[in-house]
Amino acid sequence: MQDPLFYLTMAVAGLSGLVIVAVTALRGWNGWLELKRAELARGAGEAAPPSAATRIEVADLKERIRKLEAIAAGVDL
């Protein structure tokens, strides 16, 4: 196995594989950055505070969860 052509071929194949992986990773990274930019742009316009009905509903759900946790723990309300 002292053939220099074999080693050259393996080096070129390895380098080609590395380049393919690097290009794919960079495309994925750029896609992820674009997604985050779109999320930030979309979220900037939706900064309205929650309505009173929403806050009441969330408080009601929290109370229900508290009661269910008390039941699960065996605490008598």
Image (spheres, rainbow, N blue to C red):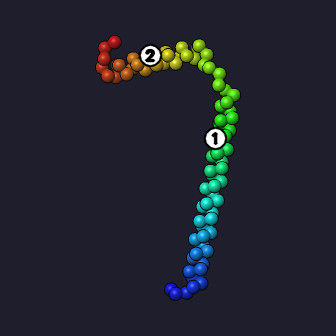
Amino acid at dot 1: Lys
Amino acid at dot 2: Glu
Mark positioned earlier in the residue sequence (1 or 2): 1
Of residues 60 and 3, which is closer to you in this image? 3
Residue 25 percent coordinates (x, y) = 61, 56
Q: Is residue 16 above or below residue 3?
A: above
Total labels drawn: 2
x 63%, y 57%: residue: 24
Residue 59 percent coordinates (x, y) = 50, 16
> Which quarter of the rendering shows the C terminus?
top left
Q: Residues within 10 Å of mark 2 (few under 14, many from 20)?
A: few
Residue 17 percent coordinates (x, y) = 60, 67
Res 5 → quadrant: bottom right
x 35%, y 19%: residue: 70
Tell us which disc is closer to us: 1 or 2. Answer: 1
Q: Which mark is residue 47?
A: none
x 60%, y 78%: residue: 9
Left or right position of 16 against 67: right
Residue 29 percent coordinates (x, y) = 62, 50
Instruction: Give the residue pinned by disc 2.
Output: 63
Residue most extreme to the bottom: 2
CA gap between label 1 and label 2 equals 35 Å
User: SS of the residue at dot 1?
Assistant: helix
Res 66 → quadrant: top left
Q: Which mark is residue 36?
A: 1
